[in-house]
């Protein structure tokens, strides 16, 4: 069963939400955050990217930076830019991109569910990134930003979502940075809140879509606090962390593409010949060509686009990992031909989220920065759930969820 509970959210007043809200901490660098915050002292970047309050070049991992985050979080509350709700609520957060809307329930999930594997992951986490987020949670004693979960489609929860969606939202704005619409409702009805708790309790598991490091950090800090409290009972607020949970069928996963700096000493002709061992290679000309189906890839090389179709026998439809296009391309192109084995550490490869379009791949190759580009067909949410259920881990840089959650709409305090 999945344990969730409502919480007393800390939120900006309606008239200030567009001043406070921001992109997530991990989708932009320090200088981009500095530029976006500008002279807006209410920007959440002062809490989630507080290095912007220090001279340019200050490390985001400087101990003073974490202390500044806590100082600014308190300042936001003292000035009334963030106010805690008087009672516990669930919340609804909707995002609209390209005419499609997805509705998420904002809940507090239980750290024990993460530790026990009932909150399932599909990516490995890095200890240094976990520790960074743990420091941020510790110093603020709060989950400033939510994680992004998926759950199997549920008709009862969908009815609640659609009923609230027909009412006037608490927040409703279009983010200037991406043009996506963001809406937010407060669930006040006790019966609806109990129904939400009960429906999640029927689910054997939930799935991390995005935010593996934040999930790990929240769970580890919760475990720390359990050990530090001799009177620990299990219902304390630190046992829970904030998540926005979406029905799996609503989520949009974009392609996550690759650009490589060299062909491992080969000429273009030699590289194309090597590809023909495991792929049917077809020249598609100079117009951008997007993969049309699973196991088809697009290659951009020397101002030409190519279709690469993986031959039968090069993948295993019965293996949740072996059937993935990200695994096929990693094994048979990046590793076997280009000798790029470790995608996490190699300096010869970079990754481009699908929101930027294939034109970005073309631009980076045509500029001479990169030698070739590889576009992949997007992973499906069902594939992610199958992999998580099997206990396996996806290859690196496999998924790109869009739109990203905005931060600052609601915060969860651990006490």
Image (cartoon, grey):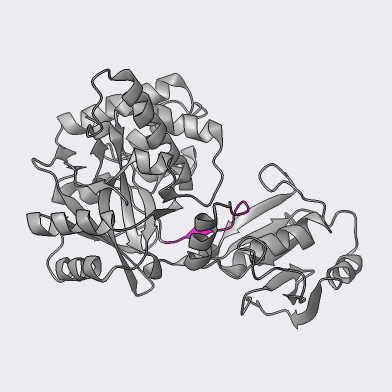
Q: Nearer the viewer, residue 163 or 314?
A: 314
Image height check: is 203 above or below 143?
A: below
* 396 horizontally vs 349: left or right: left
Identify the image quadrant of the C terminus: top left
Count the numbered circles shown. 0
* 386 horizontally vs 139: left or right: right
| Residue 404 falls in image quadrant | bottom left
Q: Is residue 301 magenta?
A: no
Q: Nearer the viewer, residue 415 or 266?
A: 415
Q: Nearer the viewer, residue 342 or 314?
A: 314
Question: Which is the main secondary structure of the residues drawn in magenta?
Answer: loop
* 5 horizontally vs 283: left or right: left
- Residue 324 in the image: state x and y as whole percent: 63, 65
Give the residue at x 69% y 72%.
Answer: 298
Give the residue at x 15% y 66%.
Answer: 164
| Residue 193 falls in image quadrant | bottom left
Q: Nearer the viewer, residue 304 or 110?
A: 110
Which residue range is magenta in the image?
A: 393-402
Q: Is residue 401 magenta?
A: yes
- Residue 148 in the image: state x and y as whole percent: 38, 52
| Residue 231 falls in image quadrant | top left
- Residue 290 in the image: state x and y as whole percent: 62, 76
Image height check: is 119 above or below 402?
A: above
Q: Does residue 173 show up?
A: yes
Give the residue at x 44% y 61%.
Answer: 402
* 88 horizontally vs 210: left or right: left
């Amino acid at each position: 069963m999945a344990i969730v509970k409502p919480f007393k959210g800390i939120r900006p007043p309606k008239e200030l939400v567009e001043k406070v809200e921001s992109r997530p901490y991990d989708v932009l660098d320090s200088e981009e955050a500095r530029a976006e915050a500008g002279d807006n002292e209410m920007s959440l970047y002062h809490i989630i990217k507080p290095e912007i309050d220090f001279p340019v070049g200050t490390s985001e991992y400087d101990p003073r930076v974490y202390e500044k985050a806590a100082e600014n979080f308190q300042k936001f509350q003292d000035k009334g830019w963030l106010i805690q709700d008087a009672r516990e609520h669930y919340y609804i957060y909707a995002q609209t991109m390209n005419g499609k809307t997805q509705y998420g329930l904002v809940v507090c999930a239980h750290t024990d569910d993460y530790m026990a594997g009932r909150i399932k992951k599909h990516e490995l986490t890095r200890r240094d990134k976990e520790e960074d987020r743990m420091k941020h949670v510790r110093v603020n004693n709060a989950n400033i930003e939510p994680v992004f979960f998926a759950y199997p489609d549920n008709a009862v929860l969908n009815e609640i979502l659609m009923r609230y969606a027909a009412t006037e939202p608490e927040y409703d704005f279009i983010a200037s940075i991406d043009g996506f619409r963001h809406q937010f409702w407060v669930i006040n009805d006790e019966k609806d809140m109990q129904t939400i708790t009960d429906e999640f309790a029927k689910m054997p598991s939930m799935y991390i879509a995005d935010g593996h490091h934040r999930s790990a950090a929240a769970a580890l800090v919760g475990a720390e606090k359990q050990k530090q409290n001799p009177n620990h009972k299990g219902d304390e607020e630190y046992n829970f962390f904030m998540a926005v949970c979406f029905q799996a069928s609503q989520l949009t996963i974009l392609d996550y593409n690759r650009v490589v700096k060299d062909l491992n000493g080969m000429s273009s002709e030699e590289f194309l010949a090597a590809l023909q061992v495991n792929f049917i290679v077809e020249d598609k000309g100079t117009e951008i060509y997007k993969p049309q189906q699973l196991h088809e890839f697009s290659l951009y090389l020397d101002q030409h686009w190519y279709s690469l179709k993986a031959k039968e026998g090069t993948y295993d439809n019965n293996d949740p990992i072996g059937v993935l296009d990200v695994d096929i391309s990693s094994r048979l192109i990046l590793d076997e031909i280009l000798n790029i084995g470790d995608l996490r550490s190699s300096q010869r490869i970079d990754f481009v989220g699908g929101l930027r379009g294939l034109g970005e791949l073309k631009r980076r190759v045509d500029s001479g920065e990169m030698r070739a580009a590889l576009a992949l067909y997007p992973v499906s949410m069902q594939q992610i759930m199958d992999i998580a259920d099997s206990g396996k881990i996806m290859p690196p840089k496999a998924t790109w969820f869009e739109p990203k959650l905005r931060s600052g709409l609601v915060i969860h305090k651990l006490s």
